[in-house]
Image (tube, rainbow, N blue to C red):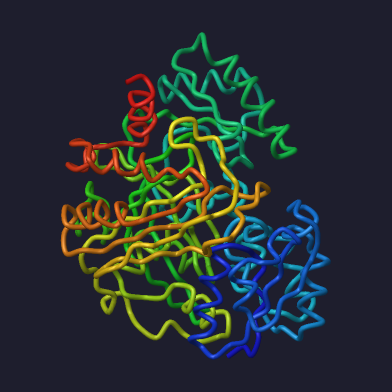
Amino acid sequence: MFSKILIANRGEIALRILRACRELGIRTVAVHSTADTDAMYVRLADEAVCIGPPASRDSYLNVAAILSAATITGADAIHPGYGFLSENADFAETVEAHGLTFIGPTAEHIRMMGDKITAKTTMMALGVPLVPGSDGALESLEQAREVAAKVGYPVLIKAAAGGGGRGMKVAPTEADLEEAWSVARTEARAAFGNDEVYLEKYLDKPRHIELQIMADTHGNVVHYGERDCSLQRRHQKLLEEAGSPALTARQRDEIGAIATSALTKLGYRNAGTLEFLYQDGQFCFIEMNTRLQVEHPVTEMVCDVDLVREQIRIAAGEPIGYSQSDIKFSGHAIECRINAEDPQTFMPTPGTITVYHPPGGLGVRIDSALYAGYRVPPYYDSMIAKLIVRAPTRLEAIERMRRALDEFVIEGVKTVIPLHRKILEDPQFRKGDYTIHWLENFVARQQQG
């Protein structure tokens, strides 16, 4: 087992990793920008190193500074968390080249799954179902027209190196295809320095279902069930559930078997998440995240497993130590992302937390690095807390979440807590009757009325 782990991240995920390390008896090193000097994870770490000014490129994306911090503190492994450098294959490669362990997949697999076209062709070869579309990158507008005619309109033009909804445009009809093609390529070039795009059939009422997997270095691969992440605004998730109200246990087992078989053949290592669009009883693979997910706590709550602890154990060479049949799913879990944003305009609201009182009680979990007096900086993602609840049934989990949201007091900045309350009261949500387009429409209705 490692003696000291450097946490190459910030905020609640840095604190989450620190807690797992503490329970394993591993010392921790926190790296931080000058904006995060007073952050809770910095205060609680065994050692802390300032790696630069507030801008991410000068601190949390500064590979040289992070490796220097690992060297001077004697760390033997680096955990990247999520975001920042977590899916940077060059970083993973450099960490290993410096004699340190990267707690995550191999650079080869990060690179493979980081390109959506490569990821799709790889998964297709491994027997994972895909959304109908082009076999690879489109070479011309004429080729796009040919593929679109074959799969049928509407279609979606997507950036090969995309993420967060950038470089993604819908063409409802053939007349719209040229503009979608042009805009998607322009956005992709500006955002990712790569204007390669591909085409998929646009599904009109899908759910976003993802499957959490873990693989060790001894050939063992297991999954921890599905999460429903369909409630998204501008392709950013806001509320997640485990399991999905749309799936049966049999469907979970079927897609789980396909996914674990594929990753066993691939020789994958550590944590990963396969993301699917699910419509009319069919799963269609869209991408794979080669890291821990923001929403991992809902999986932990229904499986009673510490995924970060498992990541660390596997990176240290230990086997998973249990089989798929040993993983039991119990109850239902919901996560609400609490962002420092205006609940109507969604504009970020950085500022000083004047009052902070988190909810408690049976089945309630808070993942947050907030405290009264903490200043939410304007330089990073606006998520400041995750509120997670578990209960025996979905409806009980909804009521528990409503109660917990009512108890949650954050003053000094605006948050999206009022929006979460409205979502949980909506009859369609309570029935589990929603798709990836539901939240956009719900927000639009709220803004109009």
Residue 240 on image: x %, y %: 36, 51
Residue 405 on image: x %, y %: 32, 52
Asked whether, in this view, residue 434 is left or right of residue 414, the answer is left
For image coordinates 59% across by 60% down, the residue present is 374
Looking at the figure, which quarter contains the N terminus?
bottom right
**Quarter-of-image position of residue 96:** bottom right
Looking at the figure, which quarter contains the C terminus?
top left
Asked whether, in this view, residue 133 is left or right of residue 164, the answer is left
Judging depth in this view, the residue of 228 and 170 nearest the camera is 228
For image coordinates 53% across by 47% down, the residue present is 121
> Furthest residue to the front?
354
Residue 118 on image: x %, y %: 59, 48
Residue 382 on image: x %, y %: 56, 47
**Quarter-of-image position of residue 72:** bottom right
User: Up-down: is 137 above or below 87?
Assistant: above
For image coordinates 77% across by 52% down, the residue present is 57
